[in-house]
Image: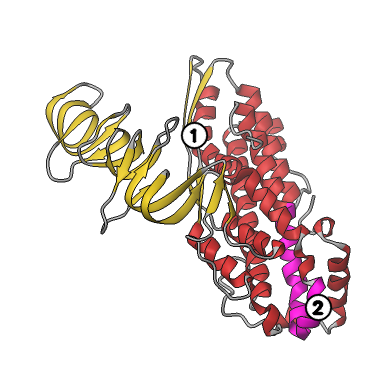
Amino acid sequence: MTSRNYTRYLQGSMIALLATVPMMTNCAALCCTEFVPGKDLASVDFGVDASFKNQYGVIAQAAGDMSAAATGALADVEAACLAIATDLTDFSKPDEVTALDLGNAQGNARVTAACNLASSKIKAVFPTTIAVNITPAVCSASIKAQASCQGKCSVDGKCDIKVNPPKCTGGTLEISCKGECKASASASISCEGSCTGQCTGECRATTASIDCNGRCEGTCEGTTDNAGKCSGKCNGTCKLTGGVDCKGQCNGSCTASCKGTADVAVKCSGTCDGSFEPLRCTGGKLEGGCTVDAQCNASCNASLQAKAECTPPSIKITSNSSNEKVAALFATLERNLPALLNTVQGRGKVFVDSAIALANGIGTLAQNTDKLGVKGVACAGTIIEAAGNAAAGAPIAVSAAANVTLSVGVGDPTK
Protein backbone atom coordinates (compact mmCIF):
# COMPACT_ATOMS: atom_id res chain seq x y z
CA MET A 1 0.00 0.00 0.00
CA THR A 2 1.44 3.37 -0.96
CA SER A 3 0.87 6.65 0.81
CA ARG A 4 -1.53 7.78 -1.92
CA ASN A 5 -4.02 4.94 -1.48
CA TYR A 6 -6.13 6.88 0.99
CA THR A 7 -9.48 7.04 -0.81
CA ARG A 8 -10.42 3.53 0.36
CA TYR A 9 -11.16 5.06 3.79
CA LEU A 10 -13.38 7.88 2.53
CA GLN A 11 -17.12 8.04 2.10
CA GLY A 12 -18.55 8.74 -1.37
CA SER A 13 -19.65 12.24 -0.43
CA MET A 14 -16.15 13.06 0.75
CA ILE A 15 -14.57 11.79 -2.47
CA ALA A 16 -16.96 14.00 -4.42
CA LEU A 17 -15.89 17.02 -2.38
CA LEU A 18 -12.23 16.18 -2.90
CA ALA A 19 -12.84 15.99 -6.67
CA THR A 20 -13.96 19.63 -6.71
CA VAL A 21 -10.75 20.95 -5.22
CA PRO A 22 -8.55 20.94 -8.39
CA MET A 23 -11.23 22.98 -10.16
CA MET A 24 -10.65 25.88 -7.78
CA THR A 25 -7.51 27.23 -9.50
CA ASN A 26 -5.20 25.14 -7.36
CA CYS A 27 -6.50 26.79 -4.21
CA ALA A 28 -5.48 23.80 -2.09
CA ALA A 29 -1.86 24.53 -2.90
CA LEU A 30 -2.22 28.31 -2.55
CA CYS A 31 -4.56 28.59 0.41
CA CYS A 32 -3.45 25.85 2.79
CA THR A 33 0.12 26.78 3.56
CA GLU A 34 -0.95 27.10 7.23
CA PHE A 35 -1.93 23.42 7.41
CA VAL A 36 1.29 21.77 8.55
CA PRO A 37 1.01 18.26 10.05
CA GLY A 38 2.15 18.17 13.65
CA LYS A 39 1.77 21.90 14.32
CA ASP A 40 -0.76 23.67 16.54
CA LEU A 41 -3.51 24.89 14.21
CA ALA A 42 -5.61 26.65 16.86
CA SER A 43 -4.87 30.11 15.47
CA VAL A 44 -5.43 29.21 11.79
CA ASP A 45 -8.45 30.83 10.14
CA PHE A 46 -9.79 28.44 7.50
CA GLY A 47 -12.52 30.87 6.46
CA VAL A 48 -15.29 28.60 7.76
CA ASP A 49 -18.70 29.79 9.00
CA ALA A 50 -18.70 30.50 12.74
CA SER A 51 -21.27 27.76 13.39
CA PHE A 52 -18.84 25.10 12.10
CA LYS A 53 -15.50 26.78 12.74
CA ASN A 54 -14.59 24.88 15.92
CA GLN A 55 -15.47 21.45 14.53
CA TYR A 56 -13.56 22.15 11.33
CA GLY A 57 -10.54 23.16 13.41
CA VAL A 58 -10.77 19.99 15.51
CA ILE A 59 -10.85 17.81 12.36
CA ALA A 60 -7.95 19.71 10.80
CA GLN A 61 -5.88 19.42 13.99
CA ALA A 62 -6.59 15.70 14.26
CA ALA A 63 -5.63 15.08 10.63
CA GLY A 64 -2.40 17.00 11.10
CA ASP A 65 -1.54 15.31 14.39
CA MET A 66 -2.26 11.81 13.12
CA SER A 67 -0.45 12.40 9.84
CA ALA A 68 2.68 13.54 11.69
CA ALA A 69 2.48 10.64 14.15
CA ALA A 70 2.02 8.03 11.40
CA THR A 71 4.85 9.51 9.35
CA GLY A 72 7.10 9.49 12.41
CA ALA A 73 6.20 5.90 13.26
CA LEU A 74 6.92 4.76 9.70
CA ALA A 75 10.30 6.51 9.74
CA ASP A 76 11.24 5.05 13.14
CA VAL A 77 10.24 1.54 12.11
CA GLU A 78 12.08 1.71 8.78
CA ALA A 79 15.24 3.03 10.46
CA ALA A 80 15.18 0.29 13.11
CA CYS A 81 14.58 -2.47 10.58
CA LEU A 82 17.35 -1.24 8.27
CA ALA A 83 19.72 -1.01 11.22
CA ILE A 84 18.99 -4.62 12.21
CA ALA A 85 19.40 -5.84 8.62
CA THR A 86 22.66 -3.92 8.25
CA ASP A 87 24.08 -5.19 11.55
CA LEU A 88 23.33 -8.79 10.56
CA THR A 89 24.84 -8.52 7.07
CA ASP A 90 28.35 -9.76 6.33
CA PHE A 91 29.57 -7.17 3.84
CA SER A 92 32.51 -9.38 2.88
CA LYS A 93 30.05 -11.71 1.14
CA PRO A 94 28.65 -10.31 -2.12
CA ASP A 95 25.43 -12.31 -1.86
CA GLU A 96 24.63 -10.80 1.56
CA VAL A 97 25.35 -7.25 0.38
CA THR A 98 22.94 -7.78 -2.50
CA ALA A 99 20.31 -8.99 -0.04
CA LEU A 100 20.26 -5.51 1.55
CA ASP A 101 18.95 -4.04 -1.69
CA LEU A 102 15.26 -3.20 -1.23
CA GLY A 103 14.73 -2.92 -4.96
CA ASN A 104 12.38 -0.21 -6.14
CA ALA A 105 10.28 -0.17 -2.98
CA GLN A 106 9.24 3.34 -2.08
CA GLY A 107 7.14 4.98 0.62
CA ASN A 108 5.20 2.60 2.85
CA ALA A 109 6.23 -0.39 0.73
CA ARG A 110 9.86 0.32 1.60
CA VAL A 111 9.06 0.11 5.32
CA THR A 112 7.47 -3.30 4.83
CA ALA A 113 10.40 -4.50 2.69
CA ALA A 114 12.97 -3.31 5.26
CA CYS A 115 11.21 -5.14 8.09
CA ASN A 116 10.74 -8.30 6.01
CA LEU A 117 14.48 -8.27 5.42
CA ALA A 118 15.27 -7.69 9.09
CA SER A 119 12.93 -10.51 10.11
CA SER A 120 14.51 -12.97 7.68
CA LYS A 121 18.02 -12.13 8.90
CA ILE A 122 16.97 -12.57 12.52
CA LYS A 123 15.46 -15.98 11.83
CA ALA A 124 18.65 -17.08 10.06
CA VAL A 125 20.73 -16.82 13.26
CA PHE A 126 18.11 -16.94 16.01
CA PRO A 127 19.16 -19.42 18.75
CA THR A 128 16.79 -22.11 19.98
CA THR A 129 17.36 -21.33 23.67
CA ILE A 130 16.69 -17.72 24.53
CA ALA A 131 15.19 -15.53 27.27
CA VAL A 132 13.77 -12.12 26.37
CA ASN A 133 13.05 -9.83 29.33
CA ILE A 134 11.06 -6.73 28.46
CA THR A 135 9.70 -3.74 30.32
CA PRO A 136 6.82 -2.94 27.94
CA ALA A 137 6.25 0.37 26.21
CA VAL A 138 3.35 2.28 27.78
CA CYS A 139 1.58 5.33 26.37
CA SER A 140 -0.56 7.85 28.26
CA ALA A 141 -3.27 10.15 26.90
CA SER A 142 -4.04 13.44 28.62
CA ILE A 143 -7.60 13.78 29.94
CA LYS A 144 -7.25 17.56 30.14
CA ALA A 145 -6.44 17.61 26.42
CA GLN A 146 -9.47 15.42 25.72
CA ALA A 147 -11.76 17.74 27.68
CA SER A 148 -10.36 20.79 25.91
CA CYS A 149 -10.95 19.18 22.52
CA GLN A 150 -14.44 17.94 23.39
CA GLY A 151 -15.29 21.43 24.60
CA LYS A 152 -14.66 22.72 21.09
CA CYS A 153 -17.10 20.12 19.77
CA SER A 154 -19.98 21.17 22.04
CA VAL A 155 -22.46 23.96 21.42
CA ASP A 156 -21.53 25.87 24.58
CA GLY A 157 -17.81 25.25 24.14
CA LYS A 158 -17.46 23.62 27.56
CA CYS A 159 -16.60 20.16 28.88
CA ASP A 160 -16.46 19.48 32.64
CA ILE A 161 -14.46 16.28 33.18
CA LYS A 162 -15.58 16.08 36.82
CA VAL A 163 -19.21 15.96 35.76
CA ASN A 164 -18.43 13.70 32.80
CA PRO A 165 -15.44 11.58 33.88
CA PRO A 166 -13.96 9.47 31.06
CA LYS A 167 -13.03 5.79 31.09
CA CYS A 168 -9.67 4.19 30.40
CA THR A 169 -10.65 0.90 28.76
CA GLY A 170 -7.96 -1.74 29.16
CA GLY A 171 -5.64 0.58 31.08
CA THR A 172 -5.28 2.71 34.19
CA LEU A 173 -7.15 5.96 34.82
CA GLU A 174 -4.86 8.14 36.93
CA ILE A 175 -6.42 10.88 39.04
CA SER A 176 -5.26 13.67 41.31
CA CYS A 177 -6.99 13.08 44.66
CA LYS A 178 -7.27 15.39 47.65
CA GLY A 179 -8.10 12.94 50.38
CA GLU A 180 -7.87 9.15 50.43
CA CYS A 181 -7.59 7.02 47.30
CA LYS A 182 -8.72 3.44 47.99
CA ALA A 183 -7.75 0.19 46.33
CA SER A 184 -10.28 -2.54 45.57
CA ALA A 185 -10.28 -5.91 47.29
CA SER A 186 -8.85 -7.59 44.21
CA ALA A 187 -6.32 -5.06 42.92
CA SER A 188 -3.66 -2.64 44.09
CA ILE A 189 -3.65 0.97 42.95
CA SER A 190 -0.95 3.15 41.49
CA CYS A 191 0.15 5.61 44.15
CA GLU A 192 2.28 8.71 44.47
CA GLY A 193 1.63 9.61 48.09
CA SER A 194 1.41 8.03 51.54
CA CYS A 195 0.55 4.31 51.27
CA THR A 196 -1.25 2.75 54.25
CA GLY A 197 -0.63 -0.80 52.99
CA GLN A 198 2.20 -2.55 51.20
CA CYS A 199 4.11 -0.41 48.72
CA THR A 200 5.87 -1.89 45.68
CA GLY A 201 8.10 0.32 43.55
CA GLU A 202 9.82 3.15 45.39
CA CYS A 203 9.56 4.33 48.99
CA ARG A 204 11.15 7.70 49.63
CA ALA A 205 12.05 9.00 53.07
CA THR A 206 10.40 12.30 53.93
CA THR A 207 11.38 13.33 57.47
CA ALA A 208 13.35 10.30 58.65
CA SER A 209 14.95 7.09 57.45
CA ILE A 210 12.66 4.30 56.22
CA ASP A 211 12.67 0.53 56.51
CA CYS A 212 14.10 -0.89 53.30
CA ASN A 213 14.15 -4.30 51.73
CA GLY A 214 15.56 -3.30 48.36
CA ARG A 215 18.17 -1.08 46.72
CA CYS A 216 18.81 2.10 48.69
CA GLU A 217 19.61 5.25 46.76
CA GLY A 218 21.10 7.20 49.64
CA THR A 219 22.63 5.91 52.89
CA CYS A 220 21.83 2.40 54.10
CA GLU A 221 21.87 2.06 57.90
CA GLY A 222 22.14 -1.70 57.92
CA THR A 223 23.70 -4.33 55.71
CA THR A 224 24.13 -4.23 51.95
CA ASP A 225 24.69 -7.49 50.04
CA ASN A 226 26.70 -8.00 46.85
CA ALA A 227 23.65 -7.20 44.71
CA GLY A 228 23.26 -3.81 46.41
CA LYS A 229 20.19 -4.78 48.46
CA CYS A 230 19.81 -2.86 51.71
CA SER A 231 18.44 -4.62 54.78
CA GLY A 232 17.79 -1.98 57.40
CA LYS A 233 17.08 1.74 57.32
CA CYS A 234 17.47 3.88 54.20
CA ASN A 235 18.04 7.62 54.17
CA GLY A 236 16.90 8.36 50.63
CA THR A 237 14.83 6.27 48.23
CA CYS A 238 14.34 2.54 48.61
CA LYS A 239 13.54 0.74 45.34
CA LEU A 240 11.45 -2.26 46.21
CA THR A 241 11.13 -5.57 44.42
CA GLY A 242 8.47 -6.75 46.87
CA GLY A 243 5.83 -5.00 48.95
CA VAL A 244 6.81 -3.42 52.29
CA ASP A 245 5.23 -0.99 54.71
CA CYS A 246 6.36 2.42 53.46
CA LYS A 247 6.75 5.08 56.14
CA GLY A 248 7.28 7.80 53.59
CA GLN A 249 6.32 8.67 50.01
CA CYS A 250 5.27 5.66 47.92
CA ASN A 251 5.80 5.85 44.16
CA GLY A 252 4.51 2.60 42.69
CA SER A 253 1.57 0.41 43.69
CA CYS A 254 -0.25 0.29 47.03
CA THR A 255 -2.42 -2.52 48.41
CA ALA A 256 -4.64 -0.39 50.67
CA SER A 257 -5.03 3.36 50.32
CA CYS A 258 -2.98 6.27 49.05
CA LYS A 259 -3.46 9.43 51.10
CA GLY A 260 -3.07 13.10 50.47
CA THR A 261 -4.19 16.11 52.46
CA ALA A 262 -6.70 18.89 51.92
CA ASP A 263 -3.85 20.97 50.48
CA VAL A 264 -1.68 18.34 48.79
CA ALA A 265 -3.19 15.96 46.23
CA VAL A 266 -1.90 12.48 45.51
CA LYS A 267 -1.75 10.76 42.14
CA CYS A 268 -3.49 7.40 42.19
CA SER A 269 -5.75 5.06 40.22
CA GLY A 270 -8.40 4.02 42.74
CA THR A 271 -11.61 5.51 44.14
CA CYS A 272 -11.08 8.98 45.62
CA ASP A 273 -12.78 9.87 48.90
CA GLY A 274 -12.63 13.63 48.34
CA SER A 275 -12.28 16.11 45.49
CA PHE A 276 -10.46 14.75 42.47
CA GLU A 277 -9.41 15.54 38.92
CA PRO A 278 -8.78 12.91 36.20
CA LEU A 279 -5.26 13.26 34.80
CA ARG A 280 -4.41 10.63 32.18
CA CYS A 281 -5.22 7.24 30.71
CA THR A 282 -2.20 4.93 30.69
CA GLY A 283 -1.91 1.72 28.70
CA GLY A 284 -5.52 1.75 27.48
CA LYS A 285 -8.08 3.51 25.30
CA LEU A 286 -9.50 6.80 26.56
CA GLU A 287 -13.25 6.77 26.03
CA GLY A 288 -16.34 8.63 27.18
CA GLY A 289 -16.18 12.08 28.70
CA CYS A 290 -18.50 14.80 27.45
CA THR A 291 -21.21 13.86 24.97
CA VAL A 292 -20.36 15.40 21.60
CA ASP A 293 -20.81 14.77 17.89
CA ALA A 294 -19.42 11.33 16.91
CA GLN A 295 -17.08 12.65 14.22
CA CYS A 296 -15.77 15.43 16.42
CA ASN A 297 -15.16 12.90 19.19
CA ALA A 298 -13.32 10.60 16.74
CA SER A 299 -11.15 13.56 15.79
CA CYS A 300 -10.39 14.27 19.45
CA ASN A 301 -9.45 10.62 20.01
CA ALA A 302 -7.15 10.71 16.99
CA SER A 303 -5.34 13.80 18.29
CA LEU A 304 -4.97 12.22 21.73
CA GLN A 305 -3.49 9.01 20.36
CA ALA A 306 -1.16 10.94 18.08
CA LYS A 307 0.10 13.07 20.97
CA ALA A 308 0.22 10.30 23.57
CA GLU A 309 3.33 10.38 25.75
CA CYS A 310 5.09 7.03 25.59
CA THR A 311 7.55 5.49 28.02
CA PRO A 312 9.97 3.53 25.83
CA PRO A 313 10.49 -0.16 26.58
CA SER A 314 13.71 -1.72 27.78
CA ILE A 315 14.95 -5.12 26.67
CA LYS A 316 17.53 -7.63 27.84
CA ILE A 317 18.26 -10.85 25.95
CA THR A 318 20.19 -13.86 27.19
CA SER A 319 20.87 -17.30 25.74
CA ASN A 320 22.97 -20.40 26.25
CA SER A 321 24.17 -20.09 22.65
CA SER A 322 27.41 -18.18 22.26
CA ASN A 323 29.04 -17.26 18.97
CA GLU A 324 29.87 -14.15 16.99
CA LYS A 325 26.60 -14.08 15.02
CA VAL A 326 24.42 -14.56 18.09
CA ALA A 327 26.32 -11.81 19.93
CA ALA A 328 25.74 -9.45 16.99
CA LEU A 329 22.05 -10.40 16.95
CA PHE A 330 21.57 -9.66 20.64
CA ALA A 331 23.41 -6.36 20.38
CA THR A 332 21.33 -5.06 17.47
CA LEU A 333 18.07 -6.26 19.02
CA GLU A 334 18.78 -4.49 22.30
CA ARG A 335 19.50 -1.30 20.34
CA ASN A 336 16.64 -1.42 17.86
CA LEU A 337 13.78 -3.49 19.29
CA PRO A 338 12.69 -0.71 21.70
CA ALA A 339 11.72 1.55 18.76
CA LEU A 340 9.73 -1.28 17.18
CA LEU A 341 8.05 -2.25 20.46
CA ASN A 342 7.15 1.38 21.06
CA THR A 343 5.10 1.24 17.85
CA VAL A 344 3.66 -2.24 18.41
CA GLN A 345 2.98 -2.13 22.16
CA GLY A 346 2.89 1.57 23.04
CA ARG A 347 0.82 2.81 20.09
CA GLY A 348 -0.53 -0.48 18.76
CA LYS A 349 -4.12 -1.22 17.86
CA VAL A 350 -5.61 1.88 19.50
CA PHE A 351 -3.39 4.08 17.31
CA VAL A 352 -4.42 2.23 14.14
CA ASP A 353 -8.11 2.20 15.03
CA SER A 354 -8.09 5.94 15.78
CA ALA A 355 -6.42 6.78 12.47
CA ILE A 356 -8.91 4.71 10.47
CA ALA A 357 -11.92 6.03 12.42
CA LEU A 358 -10.82 9.59 11.70
CA ALA A 359 -10.55 8.97 7.94
CA ASN A 360 -13.72 6.90 7.75
CA GLY A 361 -15.81 9.57 9.46
CA ILE A 362 -14.41 12.66 7.82
CA GLY A 363 -17.58 12.92 5.70
CA THR A 364 -18.72 15.55 8.20
CA LEU A 365 -16.90 18.05 6.00
CA ALA A 366 -18.96 17.04 2.97
CA GLN A 367 -22.17 17.34 4.97
CA ASN A 368 -21.38 20.98 5.73
CA THR A 369 -20.08 22.28 2.40
CA ASP A 370 -22.43 25.27 2.64
CA LYS A 371 -20.49 26.40 5.72
CA LEU A 372 -16.96 25.90 4.44
CA GLY A 373 -16.43 28.81 2.10
CA VAL A 374 -13.86 28.85 -0.70
CA LYS A 375 -10.82 28.38 1.51
CA GLY A 376 -12.53 25.79 3.70
CA VAL A 377 -13.46 23.63 0.70
CA ALA A 378 -9.98 23.97 -0.81
CA CYS A 379 -8.23 23.14 2.44
CA ALA A 380 -10.53 20.16 2.93
CA GLY A 381 -8.61 18.38 0.18
CA THR A 382 -5.34 18.75 2.08
CA ILE A 383 -6.96 17.71 5.35
CA ILE A 384 -8.62 14.66 3.75
CA GLU A 385 -5.36 13.53 2.19
CA ALA A 386 -3.49 13.88 5.49
CA ALA A 387 -6.12 11.84 7.34
CA GLY A 388 -6.22 9.18 4.64
CA ASN A 389 -2.46 8.85 4.45
CA ALA A 390 -2.35 8.41 8.22
CA ALA A 391 -5.02 5.71 8.03
CA ALA A 392 -2.95 3.94 5.37
CA GLY A 393 0.39 4.40 7.11
CA ALA A 394 -0.44 3.59 10.75
CA PRO A 395 -1.40 -0.08 10.11
CA ILE A 396 1.71 -0.58 8.00
CA ALA A 397 3.99 0.85 10.69
CA VAL A 398 2.49 -1.46 13.32
CA SER A 399 2.36 -4.59 11.14
CA ALA A 400 5.89 -4.10 9.77
CA ALA A 401 7.29 -3.60 13.27
CA ALA A 402 5.36 -6.61 14.55
CA ASN A 403 6.85 -8.76 11.79
CA VAL A 404 10.22 -8.22 13.44
CA THR A 405 9.19 -8.31 17.10
CA LEU A 406 7.21 -11.53 16.62
CA SER A 407 10.28 -13.13 15.07
CA VAL A 408 11.81 -13.04 18.56
CA GLY A 409 8.55 -14.01 20.27
CA VAL A 410 7.40 -10.62 21.62
CA GLY A 411 5.14 -7.72 20.68
CA ASP A 412 1.83 -9.18 19.49
CA PRO A 413 -0.14 -6.09 18.30
CA THR A 414 -3.50 -7.82 18.80
CA LYS A 415 -2.99 -8.01 22.59
Please report the bounds of the magenta region as a residue range.
Answer: 366-392
Q: Is residue 278 above or below residue 121?
A: below
**Kind of residue at disc 2:** Thr
In front of the other: 179 or 35: 179
Q: Is residue 295 above or below residue 214?
A: below
**Kind of residue at disc 1:** Glu
Q: Position of residue 238 (x, y in %)?
A: 24, 35
In front of the other: 71 or 182: 182
Q: Is residue 389 magenta?
A: yes
Q: Which numbered marker is on residue 27? A: none
Question: Helix or strand or loop: what does disc 1 sit on?
Answer: helix
Decide whether the magenta segment is chiefly helix, strand or loop.
helix
- Where does label 1 land, which residue? 334
In front of the other: 415 or 388: 415
Q: Is residue 215 magenta?
A: no
Left or right of 385? Residue 281 is left
Q: Position of residue 327 (x, y in %)?
A: 50, 25
Left or right of 325? Residue 203 is left
Q: What whole-number distance in Å separates the C-alpha atoms at marks 2 and 1?
A: 51 Å
> Which quadrant would residue 375 be assigned to in this image?
bottom right
> Which quadrant would residue 169 be assigned to in this image?
top right
**First along the sequence among labels 2 and 1:** 1
Task: Give me the residue at 59% from left, 34% from top.
Answer: 411
- Where does label 2 land, which residue? 369
Give neighbour class at mark 2: few <14, some 14-19, many 20+ (Cα, 10 Å).
some
Q: Please say whether residue 307 is visible from this viewpoint.
A: yes
Q: Is residue 19 above or below residue 134?
A: below
Task: Give me the residue at 69% from left, 30% from top.
Answer: 120
- Split into 4 quadrants, where in the image is the C terminus? top right
